[in-house]
Amino acid sequence: MTVSWVKSLTFDCADALVVARFWAAALGGELDEDATSDKAFVEAPGWGGPNLWFQRVPEPKTAKNRLHFDLRAPNADVPAEVDRLVKLGATVVTPGELTVLEDPEGNIFCVEL
């Protein structure tokens, strides 16, 4: 039996290039050289996750994400990873062992041990 797999995750956003640059830096992926504010592609890093697509849409985000990333902190150092992500443009929402953050357009994600 042949089964499907997740090829990519697509994010709606106001500026695809801003959000794609953040996630490329955060995850160690490669930002496509043809990326624009309308559409951007981030190739999955070596850990083999799905690729990330970002597309500009006219409407703003109006509700909580229905899906979000849970990132594992390298060397179990949550504070150091949170600090790195904040320097890239993230905002801390709730600090702790499971720290909740937002990317540059307010998409929620977590960093944990």
Image: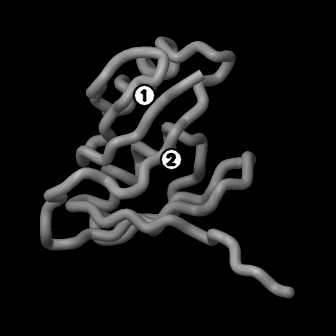
Q: Is residue 14 left or right of residue 25?
A: left
Mark 2 surroundings: few (<14), some (14-19) or many (≥20) residues within 10 A:
some
Residue 33 visible in this rendered orientation of the protein: no
65 or 58, nearer to the observer: 65
37 or 23, nearer to the observer: 23
Quarter that holds the N terminus: bottom right
Quarter that holds the C terminus: top right
The x, y position of residue 6, in whole percent, is 63, 69
Residue 67: image tag: none
Q: Earlier in the sequence, mark 2 or mark 1?
A: 2
82 or 56, nearer to the observer: 82
Amino acid type of the residue tagged 1 in the rendering = Leu
**Which residue shows up at 21% across the image and 61% down it?**
14
**Which residue shows up at 59% across the image and 24% down it?**
73
Residue 85: image tag: 1
Q: Is residue 64 left or right of residue 21?
A: left
Figure check: 79 above or below 72: above
**Which residue shows up at 25% across the image and 59% down it?**
15
Amino acid type of the residue tagged 2 in the rendering = Ala
The x, y position of residue 99, in whole percent, is 41, 24
**What is the residue that sits farthest to the right in this orientation?**
1
Q: Is residue 41 left or right of residue 108?
A: right
Figure check: 25 above or below 31: above
